[in-house]
Image (spheres, rainbow, N blue to C red):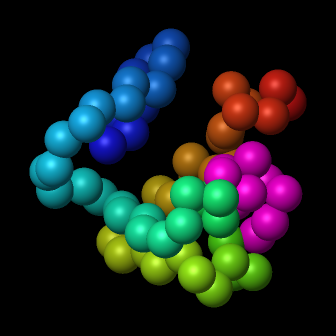
Amino acid sequence: MARREPDMVVLERTHTRADVVVRGPAVELLLVISRRRPLDAAPALRSQGDRALLDHWIEHMDWVTDG
């Protein structure tokens, strides 16, 4: 579980309800969150929930890409 706080992202190893869920191979997820591959070009990933929230997270992943 990744939870955004004002100054950081907190990762928790837990099973709980979330606003958006992404399932699939870790390598595909890493390519998407580092903006090396668009989510729509990663057919092995399946998302459920708030797609706009997922898109927002991806757009604001500066801590992964330094920019």
Q: Position of residue 29 (x, y in %)?
A: 60, 59
Q: Decide whether residue 64 is among the magenta residues.
A: no
Residue shown at 49% from the left, 18% from the top: 8
Q: Image quadrant of residue 41?
A: bottom right
Q: Quadrant of the N terminus?
A: top left
Location of residue 55 with respect to 58 vertically, above or below: below
Q: Quadrant of the C terminus?
A: top right
25 displayed left or right of 31 = left
Residue shown at 54% from the left, 67% from the top: 25
User: Does residue 24 appear in this view?
Assistant: yes
Q: Position of residue 37 (x, y in %)?
A: 80, 66
In the picture as drawn, the residue positioned furthest to the left comes out as 16
Q: Image quadrant of residue 60?
A: top right
User: Does residue 55 appear in this view?
Assistant: no
Q: Decide whether residue 32 is among the magenta residues.
A: yes
66 displayed left or right of 29 = right
The magenta region covers: 30-38
Location of residue 29 with respect to 49 vertically, above or below: above
